[in-house]
Structures are given as C-alpha cells and as structure tokens.
Amino acid sequence: MYSFEYHRPGSVAEAAQLLTGNEDAKLLAGGMTYIPTLKQRLAQPSAVIDLGGIAELKGIKEEAGGLTIGAMTTHGEVASSAAVRQAIPALAALASNIGDAQVRNRGTIGGSISNNDPAADYPAALVALGATVRTSKRELAAEDFFTGMFETALEEDEILTAVHVPKPEKAAYSKFANPASRYAIVGVFVARTSAGVRVAVTGAGPAVFRATEMEQALAGNFSAAALDNVTVAADALNSDIHASAEYRAHLVKVMAKRAVEAAG
Amino acid sequence: MVEKGIGARVLRKEDQRFITGRGRYTDDINQHGQAHAVFLRSPHAHARIRGIDTSAAEAMPGVLAVLTGEDVKADGLGNLVCGWLVKSKDGSPMHMGPHPLLAQEKARYVGDRVAVIVAETLEQAHDAAEAVVVDYEELGPVVALERAHDAGSLVHDEIASNLAYDWELGDKAAVDAAFGRAAHVTRIDLVNNRLVPNAIEPRAAIGHYDPGMDHYTLHVTSQNPHVHRLVMSAFVGVAPEHKLRVVAPDVGGGFGSKIFIYGEECVVLWASKKVRGRPVKWTADRSEAFLSDAHGRDHISHAELALDQDGSFLAMRVNTKANLGAYMSTFSSCIPTYLYGTLLAGQYKTPAIYCDVQAYYTNTAPVDAYRGAGRPEASFLIETLVDQAAGELGMDPAELRRKNFVPKTAFPYQTPVALTYDTGDYEATLDEALRLVDWKGFAARKAESQRRGRLRGIGLSCYIEACGLAPSQVVGSLGAGVGLWESAKVRFSHTGKVQALTGTHSHGQGHETTFAQLVSEKLGIPYEDVEVIHGDTEKTPVGMGTYGSRSLAVGGEALAKACDKLVEKGKKIAAHLLEASEADIEFKDGNFTVAGTDRSKSMGEVVFTAYVPHNYPAGLEPGMEESAFFDPPNFTYPAGTYVCELEIDPATGTTEILRFVAVDDFGNVINPMIVEGQVHGGLAQGIGQALLEGAVYDESGQLLTGSYMDYTMPRADDVPSFEVVTAAGTASHANSLGVKGCGEAGAIGAPAAVINAITNAIGRRVEMPATPEKVWRALQNTQTPQAAE
C-alpha cells in the first residue's frame, strides 16, 4: 500500500472539515472493500479519514414508525439487533447473510451503500423498503441515492450519516449467491408498505433497480403466482463468467417468487 | 504390544503446534540482515521484451539490486527443466522450450517473471518495481487449448509448432479390430477443467549465501527439499550440491504445486550472493499464487468404448489434448502420459486399449501435477464413459461395472496399458458402497424428492490409481531422469529414544504421527519415544519427496527396513548378553527372548549395551543406528467405489450433495483417523472440481479467476458429512507393510461420482464445473429439445 495521512476524527463535522479542500482524501468505514484496494495498490489517497471513532454514526434507534440505523453500524449489529428483528426481520436476515462472520463484524451499512457495489445486498432492501438516506447535508430517498454502478448521489464533501427505514407490512429478501464471493448474482427484496408494493433487484444489473412490472402484478395480488406471467428482459442485465444475462433474468423471477412466498 | 502402533487412531502430534499458531512456516522465519524481493511480472500473455530500463528503480530508496533475464544469462545460470523425457509416436524426443529463471526475449504468460527487485523493505521493493520500465511488443497470444494447434503464433519461437509431443500407448491395431466387431460403441467428448492448486500457505523462499563459509541455505515451501537441491545444483547451477542446504520447514499444503522447482527460489538464492550475502526473502501474495503456481488438469478428450452384445468391454480408444501452459514444469510431461494413459484400464479387464495424447504449449501458467496428477483425468474419463454406456444399453451402471471388473482371482493382472495390478477386490468395495448408500432404495428416495419438486440423482465411480511411485528401472525406461526410491535412518540414543529421519516431507499428511506409529510398532517401543525428522537436507537422508501417495509405501518401507536392521543387530547383542545362539533369539513386543525360555533382554537394555559396550560381541560395531534405501518392485494400486447422491433445484440449477459414500481399499492402514482425514480433503477437492472450481482465461490470456472473488474454492457448506470406509483392504505386495497410499484417492474418484449423479438426475451430462447455470441450461434443453443450441 502507498503512504497516506491517516485521520480519526471524533465528529461528523470534523470529518467533513478534513474532507473539504482535500480532493484525494477518502473516507474509511469498515474497510471491507477499501483496505484490500489499498493493499493491492489500486488506490493512492492523499489521506484516509477513518470514521470509526465517531459515536454519533453508530447505533440503531426506533424513530417515526421505523428504524434509524447509523452509517457505522455493522452488519452483525443489524443482524442481531432485537429492534431490527422485531420491526423488519427481513432486514436482519439479509444482514446475517452478508459475507462471513469477519465481514459482518467489520463491514458497515454506510460503507456498503456508499460504495454501491452492484452486487451488494443492502441497496435492494433500502430501495424496496422506501428508506431515506441522511447525510451531513441533506436527506434523500434511497432510490435517488443509488445512481449507477459504484456511484451514488454523495458529493465530494458529503458524509452519509444514517438511513431511516420505515417498517413494512410484509417483506423478504431472496438471494442467489455467487458461489465464489457470496455476493448476490441476483438478490430480490420484496416489500409491501402503506405506500404499496416494491420489488428491488440487486446483482442483476449495473446497479439496484425496481422491477415495476412485478410491483404492478403484486399490487393487486400479493402472491408468487401473480408473477407467473411477468417477463424479465435480459437486455440490460450483467453477464460474466458466473452467470449470463439470460440466466440472471430467469433468476430475478425465481428469487422474486421466493421472496414473495417468504414474505407470506 | 505397543499401545499406539499400527492401526491405532492416534491424534496427530503436529496439530498441537498448528492449531495453537506455533507452526513455523517459511514466512515466519526472519534472518539477520534480511532483504526483500518482489518479482515484476508480465501483464501480457505474450510479448517480446524489447528492453528493460532499471535505472530509475535502482536509484530508489533502499534498493539493493534490480536483476533481469540478461543478468541471469550473464551469470551463466541454467534453465529450469522438466525431468521426464517423453517421446512422440515417431520416436522423436519432446520439444522442451527454454524456461529461464527470469524471462529472456519474451514473456510467455501473464505472471511470467520479468525482473526481481531486492530492497531493504518489502514496500521499497514494491515501489521500485513500479519504476522498472519494460518495453513490451505485444504478440498474439495462444490461449485456448483447442486452438493451440492452429494458432497464428508460436509460444516458443525455437519450436516449429506449439505441439510439445504427440505420444501414444497401447496396441492400436488390436483396438481397431475390436471396434470392428463391436455390437455397441459408446462415444464421449469431455473436458477436464483447469484447476488452481490453492495451498493455504502461498509459496515462499529465503535464499542466503554465506560468503565466509562459501555456503548456501535455502528455506523454501517444498514437498521435496532434496529434489530442489538436486535440480538447483545440477541443472540451474546456482550452487554446488555439497554446499547447498535446502530446508522445507512447516509447509501449509502442496497438492503437487510445491513439488516443482520454480524460478523464484532459484532467483532469491542467486540474488543473495549478488547483494553480498544478505538473506533475500520472497513470499507470494495470493494474486501471485493464482497467476504463477503451476495449475492442474486441463484436458480435452474424445473417448470410445466398444462393447459386445452382453455388455462386455472389448476395447477403448482415447484421444486427449493436454495443456502444458507456457513452459514445461518439473514433472509436466509425465502427467498426461505415464500417469494418465497407463491408468485407462481402470478396474476393468478391457482387453485392448489405445490412447494418444497431444500436449500443447499455450500462453498460460505452466500446468503440472495437482492432487492425483493424470489419474483423476483417467478415472473421470473411464467412469463417465462406462456410465454413459450403461445408460445407452439400459443396464444398471453397478452391474455393467461388476461384469467387467478384473476378478479378484485374476491378480496379478497385466493391463494392456503397461501396469501390473498386484492385488484388489473391486466387487468387495462396490458391494460395500452399494449397501451403505442403499442403492436399491434409490427409486423411493427419488420419488420423495420429486414430490418436493427436486430432481434426485445417484452416481457411481469405481476408481483406481497407481501410487507408491515408483520402481526406478520402470520409470527410467519410460523417460524419468531420476530414480524414485526413498531412504531412511533410524537412530537410538543411549536412553532408548529414537530419531527417525526420512527423506520424504510432510506438509499436511501427518507423517510425524504415522511414521512414529510405524517405528513404535516395529521396534516395540512407546510411540512417545519416537521423533520423526524431515525437511532439511543437512539432517535427513536423501529422498525424492512427497507426492503420488508415495511417502508411506516407499519412505515408510525404508523406515521399516532400517528398523528390521536394528532388530537384527539387537538379536546379536541380546544373544551375547543371554549367552545364547543368535538363531534362538526371538524379538517380540520390544523384548529379545531366548526361544522357549523366559530369559530375555528388553530393547532398552540392548540399546544401552550397544552404546556402553563393556560386555559386547566381538567384532560388532557399537551403536544402534541403521539406514536403509527402498526401491519398490511395483506401484501400489489403491482402488475403491464412491457413490454420490444429490438433489437439483430445477428452478435455479443448484446442486446439493446429500450423501457421499467412499469405500476405499488402501491395503493395510497405519492410522485410520489420518487416512479418513486424507480422504475427506481429497473428496472436498474432487467435489470442488466437479461443481465449483475452474480457471478461466479470457481471449487475451488474462486470468479472469485470479482471486477468491471469482475462483470458487469448496467450503464446508458445499460438501456433505462424508461416509468413509477404509476397512475392506487387500494388502499390497509392493512393500512389507502392505500399504498402498491414500493422499489422492478422494480427488481422483469423486468428480465422476458427482457428474454421474447429475447426469442421472437430469438426463444429460454437463461439463465440469457443473455450475448452476450449466445445469439449468441443460434442463432447459432437456425439456425443450428444439431450443438446444
């Protein structure tokens, strides 16, 4: 790894100040993607700003009919949180199946969604559940936050602080894991909330997307059978050595049906 | 009788240090004044090196040396060699392209060593590596094996084509004649997928030249330190053999990949001298391991089986194309030939077999032995072919096999492909496996799966392998450049404790335990009194190393012979002490007794007398220390039956292995627990090959599966709880212990059992690795044949 300055600020304000005017500085959350990147000399930041010392970014609290999860909350904390398991068990289940125990104990929800890996699990949950993303500057809908492959709406000097997730009526996540990485080849999160039914797909495309045809089919009849006649186009989907676009398209439907069944 | 002798399930001695983090691996060793090496590797699969500018790198902080292929040439160092000469059909020798320590003129695969940077710290060496400027002229790469023959470019300009050799074995005329009268011919085309070995400890080396002593020491991740010493002195010429010490300390897995003599260890030893005797250390990172460890398998084959009306095998015909990669690695030439073609009889009495193999160079990492080495490829081919024949004839695959087995009354059995099987009982292992898995109850289980929407399949594999490599005269006549004996030394101390020194090397096999049990049994002394020493050419007697499941059958037999010599000497001493005739002395359970009396001397008393020879036989040398060499009269032939039962989710194509039954005939077994552990590991790797693993290069020769994000290693949840039986053994005649070897069986036998079970479940065969997408596509094609492409 190349040399860089290391900072460990104690507050979001201090972290934001360190970012300002330091173009090549990078924020470090759990480091599950960034530390390997540094070790392989694939990044040469001027400074690394470690968010691990900021207490205000950690923790889960019940708020406004849902949960607010601090950006530096680990997957393991989400998976084992009584509040999450009670209010949104599908989210706890999703978190319990990210990576392995080591990753779950280091990786954070904020780091994951800021990186926006096209095969990450959380983006599907946040879009389907209609979550709100909070930053040092603003609040925005999760759907508007994820803008493309490894891209988000975050500005250069903006720091993600928390996500607020409303409690759904029903929800479930079904994942077809890459056998090597255990990331999602296809992951489908289905949620029914007071705002309607949402189906969000990760792994299959360049970034998380909503399967609107499925949402419409499920709006009137929330059952796996309702998806029988929905077709999923392979055109815009990813194709790699693990799965072709055609196979991914097929899996989107299979995983969506399984998620609907699991949601009950 | 000793308590922890042959047959006892003794916990492994070595695990105490391994599981408490006290193992001492090459990278754990740090020497005074140690410098660090980083290898600059080619980013191109095939490129001419027009020039290398090292000046900027040399000027970087902490840099001690930047060395290239030109420096290797200037110092007169030799090339790496392949030690087994294979001849083509026309009698011409194989074409071995030069394999320099550092690339000269051309880089031939992504990861080929182009330069080495030696610096005070590892980070400084990495920094300097980025400052080396290489002027590459990219050339068209030869990547796909099936196109190597007609590729537009040559991997080695010195060789007229990319074909290294075109080898054959067997009586072609007899095979052709048998096919002419066959009632049925089964044909198959199949791929044996390329694998990355993935030892948990990456390769590493520390070279140290001591200018004061004019002596060299190499610590290296080696399965065979004496072979390293031999090749590095006799061929590479980096140090004279009597001044070179090679130490292979704890080694974390090899699976074949640490047999070979690689450029890196030669370079660090040479570089140590270039930097005036500073020790130079190199440890591969995982990415380097993927790119530069010798890979395994990578065959494309067409095979045909001729049967008569009753299903008796008449003849088999096999054509195989084998990928050698960019260079011939240490044993690469014999893997797809003498360790493959000779195994094509399998467990069957097929009267005529012909096989020819074309081995090609490609711009990919070298390919060499990987757990099983040639034998998994042979076994997979035979067992899928036989299964397909059973399907085509509408016969029970178990009964077709049984009908064609070499019967147990036919041993020794001469196969039509050179080997002579000494013992075996193939029906016994088949029957036990069928009983354990409840073969007859499968239809009911399948129906139950069907009710749950799952496709259930069951598959057999009756494998054989040739282990205990090998009779030196035989391998010599087949082109081997070395003998394949082993040697051992067993040394008592005054106090009756024993050091057992072996030329083999343990890197996961548990020799420190197994060999101690063997010596304990032979000498009638407590297991705890035996220390096994291996892995250091200045401590241990010479040996050819650990691979091919040979350590016990060859190295263990050398130990046994040394023990026998000690007992013979002990009888002379005991006879003297007991004032009896040597012929009347019997040795049993650690005591020398005058036959028919209760007068005896213990081993301890005899040993003490040998070292304090105040009252001693005239003319007998003092001391109790004996050496022995053993050159086996034959290979050993472990064999067995594996059965895999699995379920497929038709919606996703996902395979779940429900049961895996392995019944092996390993002959006599010293430590059943260790043997079962070896089978478990082999099965995991065999299942990995069948379902998960596969090295993939893109068209430009970049390795797409260069990390664990893309190369699927089997994990605990990918394999079932294995049901392993090793009891039904027929003792080998190739050694006095009656042992055969068990290290590779799992990896050899498992792939066909898994693939045959999938075929059984879905009605058509898919190539390995049988990924969910491949299985799903096969199902689509099965359900709607029109859609098949």
Image (cartoon, coloured by chain):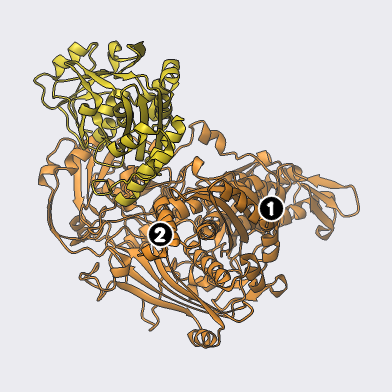
Query: What residue do we see at 40% from left, 60% from top?
Result: B368
Which chain is drawn using orange?
A: B
Report the amino acid beneath label 1: Leu
Whether residue B84 sits left or right of residue B441 in the image: it is left
Badge 1 density bin: few <14, some 14–19, many ≥20, Cα 10 Å: some
Q: Would you name the residue on which mark 2 appears?
A: B193
Of B441 and B41, which appears nearest the observer?
B441
Q: Would you name the residue on which mark 1 appears?
A: B436
Which chain is drawn using yellow?
A: A
Dividing the picture into quadrants, the one containing residue A94 is: top left
**What percent of the width, then of the height, locates residue B672?**
66, 48
| Element type where label 1 sits in the image | helix
**What percent of the width, then of the height, locates residue B605?**
76, 43
Whether residue B746 sits left or right of residue A238 in the image: it is right
Of B376 and A153, which appears nearest the observer?
A153
In the image, residue B61 above or below residue A106: below
